[in-house]
Amino acid sequence: MRVVNLVKEILTFQIGAATAGQDQMTIERMTGTRIREKRMDIGLRQASLASAVGISPSYLNLIEHNRRRIGGKLLTDLARALGVDPSHLAGGADRDLLDQLHSAATLAGDMAEIARAEELAARFPGWAGLIALQARRLAVLDERIGALTDRMAHDPFLATALHDVISAVTAIRSTAAILVSQEQIDADWQRRFHENIHTDSLRLGKSSEALVAYLEAPADAEQSPDTPMGQVDTFLAKNGYHLPMIEAETATPDEVVRLSGLTGAAAALLGGICRQYAADARALPMAAFAQAAQACNYDPALLATRCGTDFATILRRLPCLPPDAGHPPIGLAVCDAAGALLYLKRVPGFAMPTAGGACPLWPLFGALSRPSQPLRAEAILPGATASHLLCYAIATPLAVHHFDLPPVLRSTMLVMPDMAQGSAAPVPVGIACRICPRADCPSRREPAIIGTVTAL
């Protein structure tokens, strides 16, 4: 048995893995491996390194294959010849990184080779750091999912809406069962039962609308800014999506970001929005633009001609009109070429999911297939009382500074709710497939979680 183990150890050393006895491997046993990896990284021959520290190449070979322990002056000389600190060779990987790798290994269960974590961190510190980073992100996502689950489970509004729906359905079902029974029912009682069904159906309709509205825009971002975009939306919504400090040039975009108190990714997102806002404000000062918008009845095409600017700037500028100056509510959505929302201003009757999965029939996405061509379309959401929405959209390429690269597109859509129905048939859009009741939509990706309708 000893001979077999010896042969295995020799073979392991020959391929340079240093894996013999890994269940008992210690930091000291990895010192030779770190010396060898560093020497190979800088392209230094084994004989050259041995000569530099005054030992034979064969002895250095034993050290590099963890067959000899080293320390003191020899370790210092090797570190100096390799251009590293002695602690890097002797101490091995950062203990915090190793702890994170061990924690990440719990996600893989029996698949993880925990005993080789030290070797991984020593030989491939970059990959080890990436694994640790991904494990931390997974932990954050797990916490966020838990928080959202708790919110869904304990949210009083959701619980009330669900209770009302179930109560109304139960009442309608009980009354209907009585009416279809074989017993003869007095005409007066039949009338009362019919009135009860009518009343309960109205209550069910209101409860269902409230529940769907909650699901399609759960978001009061002020209550739950779970994402950087949610934090930015909270800040902008508080200001009515109007930034008077930038309009009056009393604050720079960076100063607005600092005053907002946002940090990290949220601050970066807000900074980009504020810089675009400042550029648009310089191109179209608010006082003159507001008068022109009223004179043109908020028609983007007429405004673009009158102001002598591009269509996309007009679309971005109109939603910035001060909300307390008598202007109509105007929504805005901006997305990249992948359809990911970069900016969203909701208005009554218009909302889109910020986390993806929006209805693909919105002109916002249709514009991506026709860059630089302005689109105008009337849209209508499901339901007999749904408001008509007048949408203007255009996809424009951003500046390109390199040859042979495809243009980077950004699509912008302006939305004006409560528009009178025109002569053209409106586009039957939805919020998202999961909550859209249109059963016969050819663009549907997944079934709805609520009832279906076939009429517009």
Image (cartoon, rainbow, N blue to C red):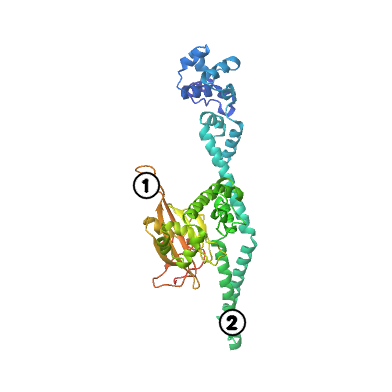
Distance in Å between CA atoms under marks 1 and 2: 63 Å
Quick one: label 2, few (<14), some, or many (20+) residues within 10 Å?
A: few
Q: Are marks 1 and 2 in contact (CB under 8 Å)?
A: no
Whether 438 is drawn above or below 97: the answer is below
Whether 223 is drawn above or below 257: the answer is below
Q: Which mark is residue 157?
A: none
Query: Which badge, 1 or 2, is on the more N-terminal residue?
Result: 2
Q: Nearer the viewer, mark 1 or mark 2?
A: 1
Q: Amino acid at mark 1?
A: Pro
Q: Residue furthest left?
A: 404
Q: Residue furthest bottom?
A: 187
- Can residue 353 be seen by looking at this rendering? no
Circle 2 residue:
195
Q: Assign the C terminus to one quadrant of the image.
A: bottom left
Q: Residue furthest front?
A: 288
Under circle 2, the secondary element is helix
Camera-side residue of 407 and 203: 407
Number of on-image labels? 2
Under circle 1, the secondary element is loop
Camera-side residue of 447 and 217: 217
Quick one: label 1, few (<14), some, or many (20+) residues within 10 Å?
A: few
Q: Is residue 85 left or right of residue 335?
A: right
- Can residue 303 be seen by looking at this rendering? yes
Q: Amino acid at mark 2?
A: Glu
- Image spot of residue 419 (x, y percent): 47, 70
Circle 1 residue:
406
- Image spot of residue 271 (x, y percent): 53, 48
Could you say which quadrant of the image residue 118 lies in? top right
- Image spot of residue 150 (x, y percent): 63, 55
Q: Residue at x 62, y 58 (%)?
A: 153
